[in-house]
Image: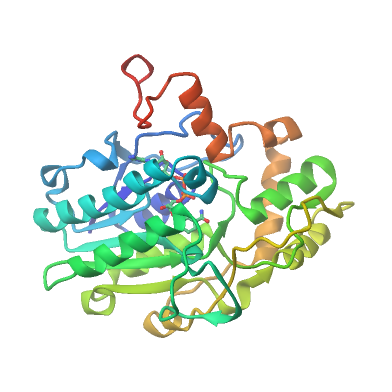
Amino acid sequence: MKILLTGSHGYIGSVCGRVLSEAGHDVVGLDTLLYRDCDLPSTQTRSLSTLDVDVRDVTPAELAGFDAIVHLAALSNDPIGDFSPELTREINADATISLARAARDAGVRRFVFSSSCSMYGASSESAVDEGAPLKPLTAYAESKVRSEEALAELAGPDFAPVSMRNATAYGVSTRLRVDLVLNNLVGWAHATGKVKIMSDGSPWRPLIHIEDISRAALAAAEAPEDLIRGEAFNVGRDDENYQVRQLGDIVQETVSGSEIEYAGSGDPDPRSYRVDFGKLRRAFPDLELTWTARAGAQELVDAYRAADLTLEQFESDRYTRLKRLRLLLDSGRVDHTLRWKQNAA
Ligand SMILES: NC(=O)c1ccc[n+]([C@@H]2O[C@H](COP(=O)([O-])OP(=O)(O)OC[C@H]3O[C@@H](n4cnc5c(N)ncnc54)[C@H](O)[C@@H]3O)[C@@H](O)[C@H]2O)c1
């Protein structure tokens, strides 16, 4: 298939491009390269031919000839959503909907949307499946709910959109993010010897490695259309739901000599959810999600050591999405809509 991968230059996209290409697909990226100076040293990524087009501006003509779109481009977390609910709505929801419409009009048959389990909000009593009520607590989660609703409405005989509700990602990517819980805990432990837990450690989070997210996106892109049309799938493994304090223990055991430190206010984080992944397992019995948080913690500490990651680098704007966007805005390299200014491009 000829696949357009939006957000191809991001944390997941850098790995997903490789996974889709290695499966034999002809992959073209689309990204405005917001994090173009943010590579983790000592890692490599497969280079893709990439359209430097803003996802808000894509036209049906640019989509002609593609069989599928894997849509990752977004402002990718809650802190950015708190910083700018408007841009989060515009880039994550409005642009997803206009991109899907353009895809349908251009005859692209499949649309694999990178959604998020964070739309379950506060749901830690028991594991929630796809039928559970959605309780988005943030602008980011709200943008995913709106997108999913619109995509389900666009589903039809010639257009098969699917929403992949990914668990919280971890793992090594050339476009590393340390604003994700496991990447962050391992980073602190590596750089300071402290496993720094900012909540009381009680919140539940399902975790998934970025390679496994990419394999699931590949499976959805290749699936019979009737299996995915208008559907939503939780993407993760039942045995990879963790409380943050359990992740702290894994990190402490992985990074030799480190100690756990509770550094937050002690208040529990209201965002806490445990997730049931049975629907994905039943629909995709051959899909193997192989990573565990423990293996991921080891992979991360090895990469941080290889890159010689210091505390200064770890805390810089390089690997934290909101810090980077603030820098681009404050330095005037992008305008208030996050479009590159001419002279910076
Ligand atoms: N990382 C996670 O834990 C996680 C979990 C669930 C869902 N997701 C979703 O997966 C997707 C990818 O996440 P990520 O962690 O790789 O994020 P990321 O921030 O690393 O990557 C996002 C990419 O999108 C690009 N982008 C942003 N705005 C754009 C625009 N207007 N036009 C074109 N490109 C634009 C950025 O340049 C960047 O390369 C997002 O939709 C995110 O919401 C991520």
Q: Residue at x 67, y 45 (%)?
A: 303
Q: Nearer the viewer, residue 45 or 119?
A: 119
Q: Is residue 133 above or below residue 332?
A: below
Extreme residue in the top direction: 343
* Lateral position of residue 126 relative to residue 3, left or right: right
Measured as percent of width and height from the top left, residue 68 is found at 23, 58
**Residue found 24% across the figure and 76% down from its top:** 224
Residue 254 location (% of width, % of height):
79, 58
Q: Quadrant of the C terminus?
A: top left
Name the one closer to the observer, 277 or 334: 334
Q: Is residue 63 left or right of residue 249?
A: left
Drawn side of residue 57 relative to residue 74, left or right: left
Q: In which quadrant of the rendered image does the N terminus lie?
A: bottom left
Total residue callouts: 0
Q: Where 312 falls versus 115 (above or below)?
A: above
Q: Give percent across and percent down for residue 38.
A: 53, 33
Of residues 89 and 280, which is closer to you in this image? Answer: 89
Quarter holding residue 201: bottom right
- Quadrant of residue 272 within the rendered picture: bottom right
Chosen colour scheme: rainbow
Residue 275, image quadrant: bottom right
Q: Is residue 300 above or below residue 130?
A: above
Q: Residue at x 40, y 34 (%)?
A: 33
Whole-percent x, y for residue 204 in the image: 65, 69
Q: Residue at x 42, y 54 (%)?
A: 16
